Image: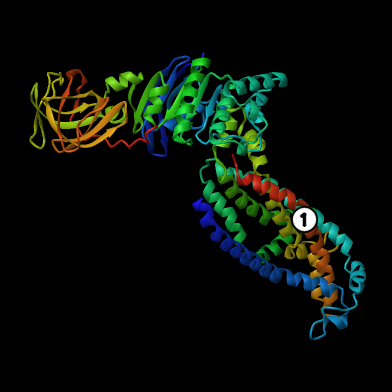
Amino acid sequence: MSSVLTSMPRRSASTLGHKLRIAGGVVISLVFLFPIYWMILTSFKDQVDIFTTPPKFFFTPTLAAYIEYMQRADIVNRLINTIIVATGAGLLSIVVGTMAGYALARIRLRGAATFGLLILLSRGVPPIALAVPMFLVARKFGLIDKHITLILAYSTFLIPYVMWLMRSFFMGLPRELEESAMIDGCSRYGAFFKIILPISLPGVLSTLIFSMILAWEELLFALVLTNRHASTIPVAIAGIAGDTVNGANWAALTAVGTITVIPVVVFALLVQKWLIKGLAEGATKG
Amino acid sequence: MGTVQIRDVRKSYGSIEVLHGVSIDIEDGEFVALVGPSGCGKSTLLRMIAGLEDITGGEILISDRVVNGVAPKDRDIAMVFQNYALYPHMNVRDNMGFALRQRRVSKPEIAERVDNAARILGLEQLLDRKPRQLSGGQRQRVAMGRAIVRNPNVFLFDEPLSNLDAKLRVQMRSEIKELHQRLKTTTIYVTHDQIEAMTLADRVVVMNGGVIEQVGSPLELYDNPASLFVAAFIGSPPMNFLEGDLLDKTTFALDDGTVLTLPEADPKGRTRATIGIRPEHFTIGATGWPALASVIEPTGSETQITARLAGKTIRVLIRGRTSTLPGETIHLNVDPQFIHFFDAAPVPVVAEMEDVA
């Protein structure tokens, strides 16, 4: 009885707090979403509307930038390249990184901690310092302008990333799960593939998505290691932005930017439901 | 045949030795409890039997085969963990059948054995649930079900009841005992709770600091503790200890000057000793050691009296009820056969065990 009486005012207070939190969330989301909104808006403007002050929110939309640059910047081909490279690098990194992360989390090896730290430290090297050596190596092996080259190059920074994320994920799982599986008849590999991996799928999947996004937006290595066949979308954007002859074409820039973002958004929406379901399952591990 | 022989087994982590040569022979069908305070090495020993920890020295034999280098999956053992370690992505049926699937047992046979185990444990209604949809007691039962479908040579239990509340713990304790009487599978059971060890096991192994203090049946340990540690560890409420000098066979001078007259007992040649008397072995009479009652705790069937004797707090447990009031002096007597003599030493601090209701 008394708990019902006392909980009444507390609940209305928490509803107010709840509303405030939601309002805060909306404001923060708007701040983050506005540049994307502005990019999409700008991509449909003509050159005059883009530079009007104050900026125009209502105007006659045009697809001119899309039509012109689909051709000029070879967008379809580059989009396909980007998908191949991001998927390839993402998958390679998730396979190697997940298994390495598991080994670091669980298997007692002399010097494992030092080894793991060294791999992490390798990420401290600025990519620009690696770009030229990588170019020279790739040229030596005849690997310039090939998908596999970018996939391998991206894996150099994605594998450490995946490895460390997955390591902490695995460390959060009770050790007894594998021990139980190993007593039940599994080898270490069997326990990993039959028990640990299925439980970790939400973590693996979200790490895979982040890795693919990192590969998707990578510019430096793509710029150095490809020229035509395997070139990716960020290279096209950089090309338009750095067009010193015609000046920066904002409509083209935002149009290609929008095209770059769309597959990521669609992909995220597709896996979102599964991701949330998986995360909720992982949260209450038996 | 599920015998287990542990021969001078040692375990070191780097230069730190945590098990200093432990030997136990466990017979087929026996229920053995390893009990001791945390850090005594009991869980490490169990994990070495399971194959989850390397054996630094000595040998472990399961069914007369040395298993030092044998993988856990090839030792034909089943283990129940403290946190149950149920596979969260599988339902109860698949959890229980997992080990059989690993051994490529035919599907109909798996179904039969899982159903059978489920019936024994009363899990028939829960077979399609995921572990997260089960209560603590149900998870515990599934973990045991997963072990019994295997029909292994040896069951290993690692503090299986520690995560349950007191009432459920008592219930599961008797279920485990009943299960063992029914299946007669060799069982090694690790616990820090001496009551669990005493009530469940045929034989109890008391460990402390990486060595075995004493091995024996529960009542042997209770009646004839081999060391002060075992005496202090086994029994609830714990044994009372008094340290002093034996002036002659019947005169015991405590360090504060109080002289107690002992009934004639055999101190085995000691002149200085710690004597131990269990709370229930005191009787209250018209004469005897005078003690000042401070707290009277009746539970109906028995009454616990906390009293001061020669400046020491002692506990006295008597059958039935008493008219003694706090502040009154009581006179304590003890049958000589119930006086335990130990070499004089400080009483080991045994972590106060949680009383099982």
Coordinates of residue A222 in the picture (x, y in percent): 77, 62
Q: In the rendered image, which residue does mark 1 sit on?
A: A269
Q: Residue at x 12, y 25 (%)?
A: B286
User: What colouring does the structure picture have?
Assistant: rainbow
Q: Residue at x 45, y 32 (%)?
A: B167
Q: Residue furthest bottom?
A: A53
Coordinates of residue B337 in the picture (x, y in percent): 20, 18
Looking at the rendered structure, the number of numbered marks drawn on it comes to: 1
**Nearer-the-camera pick, B79 or A127:** B79
Residue A182: quarter of image: top right
Instruction: Judge left or right: residue B326 versus residue A257.
Output: left
Above-or-below relation of A219 to B290 = below
Instruction: Judge left or right: residue B324 versus residue A91.
Output: left
Chain where mark 1 sits: A
Coordinates of residue B207 in the picture (x, y in percent): 35, 29
**Nearer-the-camera pick, A253 or A32:** A32
For the C terminus of chain B, the quadrant is top left
Residue A63: quarter of image: bottom right
Other-residue count near label 1 (Cα within 10 Å), few / some / many at <14 / 14–19 / ≥20: few
Asked if residue B334 shows in the view, the reply is yes
> Looking at numbered disc 1 in the image, what kind of residue is underneath it?
Leu
Residue A161: quarter of image: bottom right
Asked if residue A253 shows in the view, the reply is no
Of helix, strand and loop, which one carries label 1? helix
**Nearer-the-camera pick, A75 or A8:** A8
Above-or-below relation of A157 to B156 = below
